[in-house]
């Protein structure tokens, strides 16, 4: 472990030394923009007849260091743009600064325009199986991040209810903690409930990247089945994006994103957002009288489902200084309040139970390009979350859906009496060092350290606090990646990831049998695992890309899986990490006809072979659940997307995902004979679903420059069984019925994009839709959004 | 120009709209009328496939438990989840929910004239920790293991399918020793309700631990008004029954026999100094009979009991932990006892690699001789084993393919 680290550092250092030391040198820098003023990300800058070259960063900026004096030809090229050349003379004195304004090249640019993902082309052109959502295109909608992700093939977001409700994210059949979330490359694992993808408005993001199965090394985490990275970096020097929406179920959402960079390099950024909803939508359910008899299929309103959250992310610091390209200090402050309407079934109804959460997280971010030497970039992030989570169930009542209740005397509860409050004391440090040797070779080293120390107490049971012992968990993920770009046409990345986790846990027990006598038994364990992968892509022709990738991935057990929750979950210190072999093979192709009709096709085949899934089962005396490595699952699936557009007037697309998730557990724990469920389809998991969308654009409506967009979106999810498909008589089986969810929207944009008015209708047909068995989601709902957007890159 | 594209756009939406409408909900009601019985019996076997997530129970029916084969593969009435318990009372079959604190639906079934199991109705009930036929009711108790100090008793009328009585019991007060009285089961004895309980700390992390491992308690309630009349205590063995396991049975002559597994723990370690034994409450009394003590642990060579099935005439099948002086292991042993004469015989003919047995939901025709217990083995799957108490031999009966047997019940039609 230690030796490996030293070795890696050594290699990096060696690379650094070879490229330094020459005299009479100067620097070249500059910025590449499109004609319309947008920075061009990922443009290639080459000096003819030399090995000097680089690519532009997210600001469109570039820097070439230590260029010997002389006359050169500088060539700038970028996908979707016409190449440009410029004669330059490098002499002593001031570094040479250039600016290029690239003209869009008609053939390619227009083709790419079809897709509606132009800003994300660099991401999508990676060798990884990645889908990037251009969040900016959705900024006039009322979506949060999770609903935007729901439109990506391979992704299903299953919600238990309305705004802010419990959400299960699945990516190619991997769920829960098997998929990891990041914001600007920083893991979101323990941000708490106040800052999660079900409450982050889409306006916070510039784009959202979905890595399927194979995760690049700079996203350091033990992601078994993929990762989501939310990119918020706004590269504009000053900007304001303020929006407010109001809609059905008394839903209010506000989002304000603003930033300012002074000439001195001082930078300040504010992201603030708020969501509120009564979530009092109508549901159809059986309503129980207090004697237990049901009134069948009553239409009633939800009544204990208010959700609200308020979050502020503020940061200030300096940019473009000698010692740092970026040094920002920030603070994330937020809270949320969530009432709990139902249990796992709609007939379990609650009227007072609720949860609260908060986040208080200082952050620091440091970035420096060309540290010590050209091509060596360093990024460091750190944060610590002091936030809390609390579960409050203290009202001794039994409610029904008519909102009648029966109250009992004494200290009871609706489900389990609790005011338990805990703090995870989660700290995180990420370090990313990347080194571009030349235009063909680059290396990156990434380390993520995560510490966790849960402390909790319940004011209702002050005595129990002494039984509460720290559960300490330290996790470190170290990754090394190497990328070989043979040519514009072909590049390959290989990487290794070293996972290390140590856990310490003290279990209290009563040694003498006398009340209040407590002793502790300390348990420790640790894991060390090595994962690895490869991703490669080849452009057969510029419009036809093939890509393949593989990763051997791991997920380490979480603290409660190892140690239990003391009450209903028993610990299992012998748990092994979950692991999976993930394979992707995909292609993408763009075509056009007479520059009028444009098409794009994307297709991916994937295979997942996952083992040792950690799942709960009953312990020996059936009083508690215990986690075990008990399930193996394979998934051979495909996803494809087709898009079409006609001039700049109409665009439509369809994506389809099929995943054949099969139980690969031949012999169940404790058995010696083959399981009757072997190779059966995994139940309670959507396996066929898709999205379709269409938009019509009307230019110069009302006034020249104003545009009206009409949009339509439909989600289809095929019905699936709650339990194993092979078991039971089919007409008695419980299923989650097929979903048709249709949304329409209209956006009117004035003032060149500065003022926007959006109207949306969700679930147009007022269908009863379910993601989880019996838990009905909202019916038809209307929302209106106004948004002001201004940006300036002076 | 533009209309050319609005039309396909609209027609596409319309097509989707037509195909995307919801179906009507079924709201038909079922009426439960008694039909003339033919005298035939059908057995209802509940089975759960062995596995982890997405597991549900299936109700299978069979004409005989002695032989044949039934399967859950493409067969059986699916139940919502596998944390379910089953009971027959007044010739109706009830599928009860262990709701982990949540209220949930109980489903009732009957056999139709052709002997087919058909659903009658759903009604709402709370999480059950014990259930017993008592007079005309299905009697249940929800017992919180921590936090809330109140257990709730419910009387559910077995033909009206609704709650007809409810009673709150402060289980901390009932225990009276600083711990909580956690009811293990309830049994109708004479005209009263006898509810044995275990004393538990009810505080994390040692929720089921106790500082009182050497006592037995039975709370006596009047019925149907559920007034606490008395707590019967004894100090010769440990608590009666176990979590979700019945340990009190009224035999043919009206005496009640109480089975203690001597399984009390503290911090996960067994701490009872008393042996696993049977004690007795004589008919009409509310006292343990001090003159009666059947030390099963001693007579068996050190084995603790783990469950009992009453066969009639004072004869029981006992399930025993696999090792002497141990309270772990799933490969149970079986014995036949006559509690009246205190005789004990090991049962032969059982497999060695037993992984699961049915404990509370066995079937016996109460002839003093025959019992049916569901047994799952690692190598052969599940069978209903037919026990002959006269010769203390068990043999394979009905094979249940696809899962563990969780309950065996019988209905007439």
Image (tube, rainbow, N blue to C red):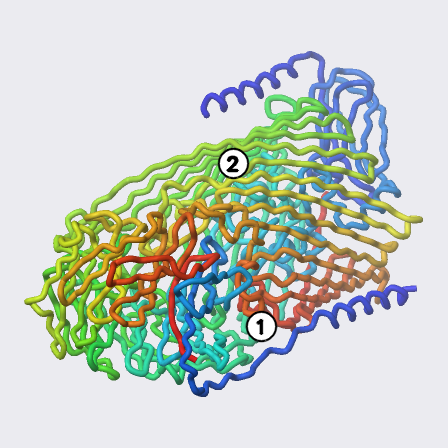
Q: Position of residue A514 (x, y in %)?
A: 14, 53
For the residues beneath circles 2 and 1, the answer to whether they share a chain is: yes
Counting labels gives: 2
Q: What residue lies at 79% left-to-right and 60% top-to-bottom?
A: A695
Q: Position of residue A474 (x, y in %)?
A: 41, 38
Residue A103 is left or right of residue A52, and the answer is right
Assign a secondary structure to mark 1. Answer: loop
Residue A52 higher or lower than A411, as above or below:
above
Judge whether residue A340 can be spotted in this image.
no
Residue B54 higher or lower than A541, as above or below:
below
Q: What residue lies at 68% left-to-right and 61% top-to-bottom?
A: A141
Q: Position of residue A180 (x, y in %)?
A: 54, 45
Front residue (pair A188, B182): B182
Where residue A249 is drawn, which disc sits there? Answer: 1
Judge whether residue A270 can be spotted in this image.
yes
Residue B319 higher or lower than A88, as above or below:
below
Give whichever of discs 2 and 1 has the lower sequence position: 1
Q: Quadrant of residue A586?
A: top right
Residue A424 is left or right of residue A61, and the answer is left
Q: Where's the C terminus of chain A, which quadrant?
A: top right
Q: What residue lies at 57% left-to-right and 28% top-to-bottom?
A: A480
Front residue (pair A640, A364): A640
Q: Which residue is mark 2?
A: A430
- State how far apart marks 2 and 1 are (Cα): 41 Å
């Amino acid at each position: 472990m230690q030796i490996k680290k030293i070795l890696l550092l050594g290699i990096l250092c060696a690379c650094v030394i070879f490229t330094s030391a020459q005299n009479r040198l100067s620097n070249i820098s500059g910025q590449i923009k499109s004609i319309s003023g947008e920075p061009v990300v990922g443009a290639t800058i080459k000096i003819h007849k030399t090995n000097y070259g680089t690519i532009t960063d997210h600001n469109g900026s570039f820097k070439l260091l230590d260029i010997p004096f002389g006359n050169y030809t500088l060539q700038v090229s970028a996908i979707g743009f016409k190449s440009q050349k410029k004669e330059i003379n490098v002499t002593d004195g001031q570094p040479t600064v250039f600016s290029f304004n690239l003209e869009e090249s008609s053939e390619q640019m227009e083709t790419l325009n079809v897709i509606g993902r132009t800003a994300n082309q660099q991401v999508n052109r990676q060798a990884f199986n990645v889908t990037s959502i251009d969040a900016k295109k959705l900024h006039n909608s009322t979506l949060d991040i999770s609903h935007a992700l729901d439109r990506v093939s391979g992704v299903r977001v299953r919600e238990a209810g309305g705004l802010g409700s419990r959400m299960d994210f699945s990516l190619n059949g991997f769920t829960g903690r098997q998929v990891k979330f990041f914001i600007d490359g920083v893991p979101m694992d323990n941000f708490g409930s106040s800052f999660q993808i079900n409450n982050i408005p889409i306006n916070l993001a510039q784009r959202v990247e979905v890595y399927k199965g194979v995760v690049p090394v700079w996203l350091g985490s033990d992601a078994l089945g993929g990762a989501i990275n939310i990119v918020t970096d706004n590269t504009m020097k000053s900007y304001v994006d303020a929006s407010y929406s109001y809609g059905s179920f008394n839903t209010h959402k506000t989002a304000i994103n603003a930033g300012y960079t002074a000439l001195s390099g001082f930078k300040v950024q504010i992201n603030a957002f708020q969501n509120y909803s009564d979530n009092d939508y109508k549901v159809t359910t059986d309503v129980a009288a207090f004697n237990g008899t049901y009134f069948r299929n009553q239409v009633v309103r939800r009544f204990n489902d208010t959700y609200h959250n308020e979050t502020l992310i503020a940061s200030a610091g300096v940019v473009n200084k000698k010692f740092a390209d970026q040094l920002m200090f920030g603070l994330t402050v937020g809270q949320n309040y969530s009432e709990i309407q139902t249990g796992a079934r709609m007939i379990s109804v609650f009227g007072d139970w609720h949860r609260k959460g908060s986040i208080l997280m200082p952050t620091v971010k440091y970035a420096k390009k060309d540290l010590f030497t050209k091509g060596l970039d360093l990024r460091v992030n750190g944060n610590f979350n002091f936030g809390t989570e609390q579960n409050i169930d203290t009202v001794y009542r039994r409610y029904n859906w008519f909102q009648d209740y029966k109250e009992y005397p004494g200290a009871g509860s609706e489900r389990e009496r609790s005011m338990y409050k805990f703090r995870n004391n989660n700290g995180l440090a990420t370090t990313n060092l990347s080194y571009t040797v030349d235009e063909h070779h680059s290396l990156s080293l990434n380390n993520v350290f995560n510490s966790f120390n849960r402390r909790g107490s319940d004011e209702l049971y002050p005595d129990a606090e002494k039984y509460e012992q720290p559960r300490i968990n330290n996790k470190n993920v170290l990754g090394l990646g190497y990328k070989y770009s043979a040519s514009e046409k072909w590049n390959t990345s290989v990487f290794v990831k070293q996972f290390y986790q140590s856990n310490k846990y003290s279990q209290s027990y009563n040694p003498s049998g006398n009340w209040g006598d407590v002793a502790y038994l300390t348990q420790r364990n640790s894991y060390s695992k090595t994962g690895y992968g490869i991703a490669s892509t080849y452009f057969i022709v510029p419009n036809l890309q093939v890509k393949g990738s593989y990763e051997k991935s791991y997920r380490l057990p979480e603290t409660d899986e190892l140690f239990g929750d003391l009450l209903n979950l028993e610990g299992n210190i012998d748990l092994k990490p979950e692991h999976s072999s993930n394979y992707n093979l995909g292609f993408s192709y763009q075509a056009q006809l007479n520059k009028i009709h444009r098409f794009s096709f994307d297709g991916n085949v994937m295979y997942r072979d996952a083992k040792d899934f950690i799942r709960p089962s009953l312990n020996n005396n059936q009083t508690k659940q215990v986690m075990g490595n008990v399930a193996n699952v394979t998934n051979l699936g495909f996803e494809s997307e087709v898009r079409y557009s006609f001039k700049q007037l109409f665009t439509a697309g369809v994506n389809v995902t099929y995943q054949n998730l099969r139980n690969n557990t031949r012999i169940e724990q404790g058995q010696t004979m083959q399981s009757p469920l072997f190779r059966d389809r995994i139940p309670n998991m959507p396996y066929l679903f898709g999205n379709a969308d269409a938009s019509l654009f009307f230019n110069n409506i009302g006034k020249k420059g104003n545009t009206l967009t009409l949009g339509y979106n439909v989600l289809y999810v095929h019905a699936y069984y709650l339990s194993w498909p092979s078991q039971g008589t089919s007409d008695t089986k419980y299923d989650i019925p097929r979903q048709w969810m249709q949304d329409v929207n209209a956006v009117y944009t004035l003032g060149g994009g500065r003022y926007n008015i959006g109207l949306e209708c969700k679930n147009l047909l007022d269908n009863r839709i379910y993601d989880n068995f019996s838990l009905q989601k909202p019916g038809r709902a209307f929302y209106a959004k106004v948004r002001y957007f201004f940006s300036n890159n002076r | 120009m533009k209309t050319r594209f609005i039309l396909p756009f609209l027609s596409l939406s319309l097509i989707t709209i037509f195909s995307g409408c919801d179906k009507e909900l079924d709201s038909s009601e079922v009426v439960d009328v008694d039909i003339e019985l033919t005298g035939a019996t059908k057995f209802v076997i509940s089975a759960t496939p062995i596995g982890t997530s997405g597991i549900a129970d299936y109700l299978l029916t069979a004409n005989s438990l002695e032989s044949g084969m039934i399967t859950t593969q493409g067969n059986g009435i699916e139940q919502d989840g596998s944390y379910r318990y089953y009971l027959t009372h007044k010739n109706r079959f009830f599928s009860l929910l262990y709701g982990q604190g949540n209220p949930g639906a109980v489903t009732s079934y009957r056999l139709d004239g052709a002997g087919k199991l058909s659903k009658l109705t759903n009604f709402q009930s709370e999480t059950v920790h014990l259930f017993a036929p008592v007079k005309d009711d299905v009697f249940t108790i929800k017992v919180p293991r921590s936090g809330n100090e109140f257990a709730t008793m419910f009387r559910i009328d077995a033909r009206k399918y609704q709650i007809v009585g409810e009673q709150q019991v402060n289980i901390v007060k009932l225990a009276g020793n600083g711990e909580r009285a956690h009811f293990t089961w309830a049994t109708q004895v004479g005209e009263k309700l006898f509810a044995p309980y275990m004393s538990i700390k009810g505080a994390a992390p040692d929720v089921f631990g106790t500082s009182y491992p050497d006592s037995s308690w039975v709370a006596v309630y009047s019925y149907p008004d559920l007034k606490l009349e008395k707590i019967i205590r004894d100090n010769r063995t440990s608590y009666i029954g176990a979590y979700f396991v019945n340990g009190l049975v009224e035999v043919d002559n009206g005496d009640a026999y109480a089975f203690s597994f001597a399984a009390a723990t503290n911090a996960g370690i067994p701490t009872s100094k008393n042996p696993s034994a049977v004690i007795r409450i004589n008919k009409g009394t509310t006292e343990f009979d001090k003159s009666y003590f059947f030390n099963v642990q001693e007579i068996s060579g050190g084995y603790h009991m783990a469950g009992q099935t009453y066969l009639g005439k004072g004869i029981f099948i006992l399930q025993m932990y696999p090792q002497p002086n141990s309270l772990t292991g799933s490969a149970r042993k079986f014995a036949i006892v006559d509690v009246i004469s205190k005789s004990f015989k090991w049962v032969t003919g059982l497999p060695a690699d037993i992984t699961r047995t049915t404990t509370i939901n066995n079937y016996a025709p109460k002839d003093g001789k025959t019992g049916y217990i569901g047994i799952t083995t690692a190598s052969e799957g599940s069978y209903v084993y037919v026990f002959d108490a006269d010769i203390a031999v068990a043999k394979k009966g009905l094979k249940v393919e696809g899962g563990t047997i969780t309950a065996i019940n019988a209905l007439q039609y």
